[in-house]
Each structure stands twice: as structure tokens, then as C-alpha cells.
Image: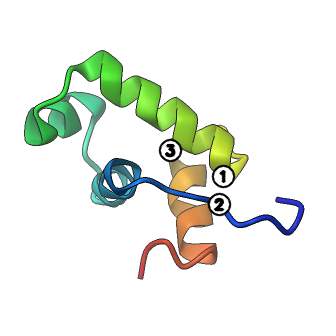
Amino acid sequence: MNGTQIEITPIEHQIIKLIANEQTNKMIAEELNYSQRSIEYHIHTICKKLEVQTRVGVVCKAFQLHILP
């Protein structure tokens, strides 16, 4: 992460919280009224920002960085 601050958008933050609550992409899409493909894109972007490759990695890194309480 090279000491730079990671900017998480409000929708990305919401998606991270839903991933942490064990929601599938389909469930997240339905809850947020997005297409499943849009959710997949957002998760891909989140993974790149957090420098992780999995949903578990997203949640772990989000806790480490205090993105999630």
C-alpha cells in the first residue's frame, strides 16, 4: 500500500459491509438495486484498491485498515 491513503467510495463501503455479512454477489445486487455484473466490477475494483484477490481478503484488509469497525 506504499503509505498512500485508500479511497473507498460510499458504494464500495456498502459492498464491503455486505461481503462481511456473507452476502453473495446476487444478494448484494438485489439489495442495492444494481446488476450482478456491476457488483462484480465493484468488487474487482475494491480488490485492486486493497491489493487482495479474494472476498475473504477484502474483509480482512477492511478490518486491518479500519474500513469496517
The answer to whether residue 34 is left or right of residue 15 is left
* Residue behind mark 2: 6
Is residue 40 at least partly visible in the picture? Answer: yes
Q: Quadrant of residue 46?
A: top right
Question: Which residue does the numbered mark 1 point to in the structure image?
Answer: 50
Contact check, label 1 and label 2, Cβ < 8 Å: yes
Front-most of residues 1 and 20: 1
Q: Residue furthest right?
A: 2
Quarter of the view holding residue 27? top left
Within 10 Å of disc 3 (Cα), the crowding (few <14, some 14-19, many 20+) is some
Is 7 positioned to the left or the right of 28 in the image? right
Q: Nearer the viewer, mark 2 or mark 3?
A: 2
Give the residue type at disc 2: Ile
Instruction: Report helix, strand or loop for mark 2.
Output: loop
Labels 1 and 3: the sequence-earlier one = 1
Q: Position of residue 11 (x, y in %)?
A: 32, 49
**Residue drawn where x is 33% and y is 30% of the image:** 39
> Could you tell me how far apart the alpha carbons at marks 1 and 2 are, in whole angstroms?
8 Å
| Residue drawn at x 38%, y 58% as measured from the top left | 13
Give the quadrant of the N terminus.
bottom right
Q: Is residue 42 left or right of residue 27?
A: right
Q: Residues within 10 Å of mark 2 (few under 14, many from 20)?
A: few
Q: Which residue is mark 3?
A: 55
Mark 1 residue type: Leu
**Quarter of the rendering occupied by the C terminus:** bottom left
What's the coloring here? Answer: rainbow
Instruction: Decide if residue 54 is on the left or right side of residue 11.
Output: right
**Rendering coords of residue 48 (x, y %):** 66, 39
Tell me which amino acid carries mark 3: Arg
Q: Secondary structure at mark 3?
A: helix
- Depicted 42 relative to depicted 1: above or below: above
- Lower position in the chain sequence, tag 2 or tag 3: 2
